[in-house]
Amino acid sequence: MGVTKTEGFTEIQNKRAVIFKALGHPARVAIIEMLIKRQACICNDMVEELPLSQSTISQHLRELKEIGIIKGEIEGTSICYCINEKVWNDIQMDLTQLFGSYKNTSECC
Amino acid sequence: MGVTKTEGFTEIQNKRAVIFKALGHPARVAIIEMLIKRQACICNDMVEELPLSQSTISQHLRELKEIGIIKGEIEGTSICYCINEKVWNDIQMDLTQLFGSYKNTSECC
DNA sequence: TTTATTAATCGTAATATTGCAATATAATAA
DNA sequence: TTATTATATTGCAATATTACGATTAATAAA
C-alpha cells in the first residue's frame, strides 16, 4: 500500500501530520533554518550550501511551499524565498497548544 | 534512491528531522493525542479507537517508541503506554526555540 | 492443561519518497 | 538574436513507508 489512511482521523490530526511530515527531512529543516537566519534567501545560495543537487533542492522547496510555510518571489532571474509569517505563526500556535496540553498527573509508566 | 542523505547536515538538523518525521502520520498524531487526554492508554484501546489494524498500530507505536516520546509498561497481558515526560519536554523546548527564533524584520516576499 | 486474550513480528503488496542527470523554461545580458 | 544564468520539471532507479493477514509469544482464565 504505502498510502496513508486519512479517513477516520480528525481534520486536525491529518493537518498536523502533513505539517510534521513536510518538516521531516534534514534538508527541509536546513532550508527553514537558513530562512530564519537570513530572513530571505536566494534559491541559488541554498544550492551552494546544501549537500544536494539543484533539482533535489527544488523538490524540497516545493514541498515546503505546498504547506505554505515558505513563499518565493521572482527577483530578476533568481527567486527569493522567505518564511510565510502568517503560516509560521499558525503552526507555532498549534504546536504550542499541542505540546502545552500535556501535563503529567499520573505515575503510570 | 529513497535514502535520506544525512551527511552534510548538522546533528540538530538531522535530529529535528527524525522527530518531525516520526510525528508525520495521522495515526501517530492520534496516538499522542490519546495519551495526552488519558494520561495512559492500554494498547488495545487504541486498536479499538483507531481505524487501523492491530499490526499496523503496533508498527506506529514502535516508531514513536524509537524516538523515545512514548514508553510502554507490561501490565498483565496488556501493555500500558504513556508519554515519556522528559523526552516530551526536550522536544517542546527545542520546538519553542526553533519557532521562537524567527522574527520578521525585512519586507522581502 | 487447554483455551483466550493481547501485542509484537514476519511476509508481502502497493505506493511514496529520495536523489540525480537531463531537459525545459524564463529572465536577463551581450 | 544568441548566450548565460537560475529554477523547475521529467524520468528514472533505489529504497522506504504503509497496511494487513498470518504467525508467534506471553500471560491469564477455565
Image (tube, coloured by chain):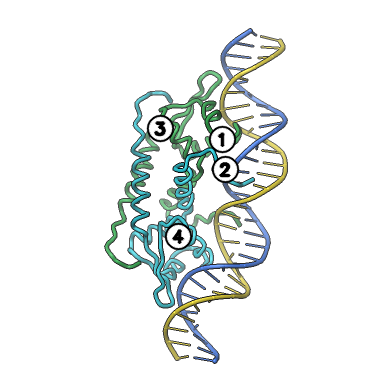
Chain colours: A cyan, B green, C yellow, D blue
**Distance between mark 2 and mark 3 Cα atoms:** 22 Å
Q: Chain of mark 4?
A: A
Question: For mark 4, what is the residue?
Answer: A65
Asked which secondary structure carries label 4, the reply is: helix
In the drawing, does residue B24 fall left or right of residue B101? right
Residues packed near mark 2 inside 10 Å, few (<14), some (14 to 19) or many (20 plus) = some
Q: Amino acid at mark 2?
A: Lys
Question: For mark 1, what is the residue?
Answer: B51
On residue A10, which mark appears? Answer: none
Question: For mark 2, what is the residue?
Answer: A5
Q: Which mark's residue is nearer the viewer, 1 or 3?
A: 1
Q: Are marks 1 and 2 in contact (CB under 8 Å)?
A: yes
**Distance between mark 1 and mark 3 Cα atoms:** 19 Å
Q: Are marks 1 and 2 on the same chain?
A: no
Q: Earlier in the sequence, mark 1 or mark 3?
A: 3
Q: Is residue A12 above or below residue A66?
A: above
**Distance between mark 2 and mark 4 Cα atoms:** 23 Å
Q: Amino acid at mark 1?
A: Pro
Asked which secondary structure carries label 1, the reply is: loop
Question: For mark 3, what is the residue?
Answer: B36
Q: Is residue B104 above or below residue B55?
A: below
Name the quadrant of the N terminus of chain B: bottom right
Q: Position of residue B22 (x, y in %)?
A: 49, 43
Q: Chain of mark 3?
A: B
Name the quadrant of the C terminus of chain B: bottom left
Q: Chain of mark 2?
A: A
Q: Residue drawn 35% across and 38% down?
A: B89
